[in-house]
């Protein structure tokens, strides 16, 4: 048996080569990989010596040779194939170990030039991988260091790699090539070309949206069903999810996550990460029904729960801090579908042992508090339409106090400004039309998803009443501008004394005049947060 090893990433390659050698497998290699193996005392044959043809064109041509591809592609069960190999004195290659030039990492570097990008497009590697993967019954093709241990174990135990494993390796190989080609396509079709092509020694200007969009996701799990029992569903993870993304979470206990669990959990997690202070978010049907900040996890939860105890039943709860025993004991009294946090104390875990069905998710966040605001956020958002896909930048805008423009005679107090910013942050995650009343770092009433902004305001008021919360003296956020004064009148009638809205309506002057007439403070954010 022969193995060809040619890797850019040398992780684990020595141990693998030693294991192959121990099984009596002849080692073939190229360039730096061959040099490394030789330095470790392993007998290795340069591919150039095997092919009888030297590397040329700065290494661009070394494995693109019939002796390589013939050894990979020949079917051992086809006599004509084996006769052709014998005629041309070609040996079979039974194990191929290849990872590719680091194209993705190269183009991710700031200031990457077009020339560097092009030079890091692998040709020979993908060609060999495709040949080996196509002939999977006869060739084990390894494209990632995580696969080495399985192959070593099977070779050691059985002297061969099982067909099941070889097929799985083949599928993984074609998936890797797809990811690689997709990354190349995304990058090159993003390069903006004017009258002249971009200079190779300069970083090209890239379009935010490539001419061809290639999304790459790997399946995490099949699900019992989707939003409804008659719909099939699966959950997929981005090929390289960032720290802090929901898909990086570890489930510590509980039933299998459902489609709706994951969708709602994402809404809660993205919202809670938006707060620097200790925060709790309770979500039901993708809308926050309670949000609050507090000195402790327990205080934040207790305040959030007050907003809408009815909707919180069977909800999704997210914390941006460690859940301790005190918080766990109170949360455990309610019916909770999913509870997520960056960490749980042992005391908290012990509390939930008695609640075996509660799904606990631990999602790591960066240690630096300032980095949490953007941790794991998606850069793009997608929406399927019939026969196509809408793609947009994700709404990751963060509003700062300095961004606010006071437009009324009455000036908001420092406390009101903090409540306005809090309300605005929550409104960003509430389905449009969104109206959010807040006071003292907690939501007091949330109106979501109505065709009329007036109705969203009325619903928020009704919910506050059901929770025995007064809206008197509250701050209110509207995710879009008030097109008429009637929207402002409704929230002021409900008790709001300060308002934050984007501004930008043809009737801004009318609405500002109404705010002055009613004696309330109003600030413009200059930003809209539709969430359809």
Image (cartoon, grey):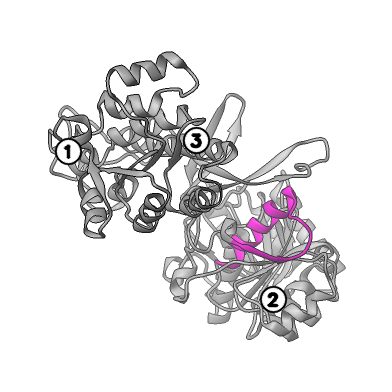
Q: Which mark is residue 59?
A: 1
Q: Which mark is residue 501?
A: none
Image quarter hosting the N terminus? top left
Position of residue 229 relative to residue 474, above or below, is above
Q: Residue at x 78, y 44 (%)?
A: 224
Note whether residue 212 is visible. Answer: no
Residue carrying label 3: 170
User: Of all residues shown, which one is farthest toward the top?
Assistant: 80
Across and down, in percent, residue 266 comes to: 63, 56
Q: Is residue 515 left or right of residue 451?
A: left
Asked if disc 3 and disc 2 are in contact, CB closer than 8 Å, the reply is no
> Which of pointers 1 and 3 lies earlier in the amino acid sequence?
1
Q: Residues within 10 Å of mark 1 (few under 14, many from 20)?
A: few
Q: Which mark is residue 473?
A: 2
Q: Is residue 57 left or right of residue 32?
A: left
Question: For the residue labelled by badge 1, is the local secondary structure a helix, a strand or a loop?
Answer: loop
Question: For the residue labelled by badge 2, is the local secondary structure a helix, a strand or a loop?
Answer: loop
For the magenta stretch, what is the residue range?
249-273
Q: Residue at x 73, y 55 (%)?
A: 257
Position of residue 497 relative to residue 395, above or below, is below
What is the CA distance from the residue labelled 1 to the residue labelled 3? 26 Å
Image quarter hosting the C terminus? top right
> Which of pointers 2 and 1 lies earlier in the amino acid sequence?
1
Q: In the rendered structure, does residue 264 fall within the stretch colored magenta?
A: yes
């Amino acid at each position: 048996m022969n193995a060809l090893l040619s890797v850019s990433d040398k992780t684990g390659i020595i141990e693998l080569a030693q294991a192959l050698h121990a099984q009596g497998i002849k080692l073939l290699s190229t360039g730096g990989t061959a040099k490394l193996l030789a330095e470790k005392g392993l007998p290795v044959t340069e591919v150039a010596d095997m092919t009888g043809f030297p590397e040329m064109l700065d290494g661009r041509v070394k494995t693109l040779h019939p002796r390589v591809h013939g050894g990979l592609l020949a079917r051992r069960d086809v006599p004509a194939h084996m006769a052709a190999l014998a005629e041309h004195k070609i040996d079979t290659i039974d194990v191929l170990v290849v990872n590719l030039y680091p194209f993705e990492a190269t183009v991710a570097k700031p200031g990457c030039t077009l020339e560097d990008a092009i030079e890091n497009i692998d040709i020979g590697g993908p060609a060999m991988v495709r040949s080996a993967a196509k002939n999977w019954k006869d060739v084990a093709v390894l494209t990632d260091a995580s696969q080495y241990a399985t192959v070593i174990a099977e070779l050691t135990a059985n002297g061969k790699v099982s067909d099941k494993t070889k097929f799985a390796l083949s599928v993984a190989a074609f998936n890797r090539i797809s990811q690689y080609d997709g990354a190349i396509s995304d990058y090159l079709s993003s390069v903006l070309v004017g009258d002249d092509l971009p200079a190779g020694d300069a970083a090209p200007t890239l379009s935010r949206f490539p001419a061809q969009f290639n999304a790459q996701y790997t399946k995490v799990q099949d699900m019992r069903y989707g939003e409804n029992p008659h719909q099939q569903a699966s959950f997929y993870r981005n090929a390289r999810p960032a720290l802090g993304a929901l898909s990086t979470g570890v489930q510590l206990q509980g039933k299998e996550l459902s489609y709706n669990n994951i969708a709602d959990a994402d809404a809660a997690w993205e919202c809670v990460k938006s707060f620097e202070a200790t925060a709790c978010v309770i979500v039901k049907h993708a809308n926050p029904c309670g949000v609050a900040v507090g000195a402790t996890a327990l205080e934040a939860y207790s305040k959030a729960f007050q907003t809408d105890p009815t909707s919180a039943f069977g909800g999704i709860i997210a914390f941006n801090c460690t859940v301790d025993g005190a918080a766990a004991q109170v949360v455990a009294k309610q019916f909770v579908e999913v509870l997520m946090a960056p960490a749980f104390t042992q005391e908290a875990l012990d509390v939930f042992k008695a609640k075996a069905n509660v799904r606990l998710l631990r999602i790591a966040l960066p240690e630096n508090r300032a980095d949490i605001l953007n941790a794991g956020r998606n850069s793009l958002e997608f929406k399927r339409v019939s026969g196509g896909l809408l793609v947009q930048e994700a709404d990751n805008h963060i509003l700062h106090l300095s961004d606010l423009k006071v437009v009324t005679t009455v000036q908001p107090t420092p406390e009101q400004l903090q409540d306005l910013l809090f309300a605005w942050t929550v409104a960003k995650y509430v389905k449009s039309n969104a109206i959010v009343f807040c006071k003292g770092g907690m939501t007091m009433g949330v109106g979501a998803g109505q065709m009329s902004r007036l109705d969203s305001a009325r619903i928020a008021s009704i919910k506050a009443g059901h929770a025995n919360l007064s809206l008197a003296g509250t701050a209110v956020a509207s995710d879009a501008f008030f097109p008429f004064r009637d929207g402002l009148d409704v929230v002021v009638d409900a008790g709001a004394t300060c308002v934050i809205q984007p501004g930008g309506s043809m009737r801004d002057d009318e609405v500002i005049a109404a705010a002055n007439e009613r004696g309330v403070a109003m600030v413009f954010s200059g930003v809209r947060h539709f969430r359809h």
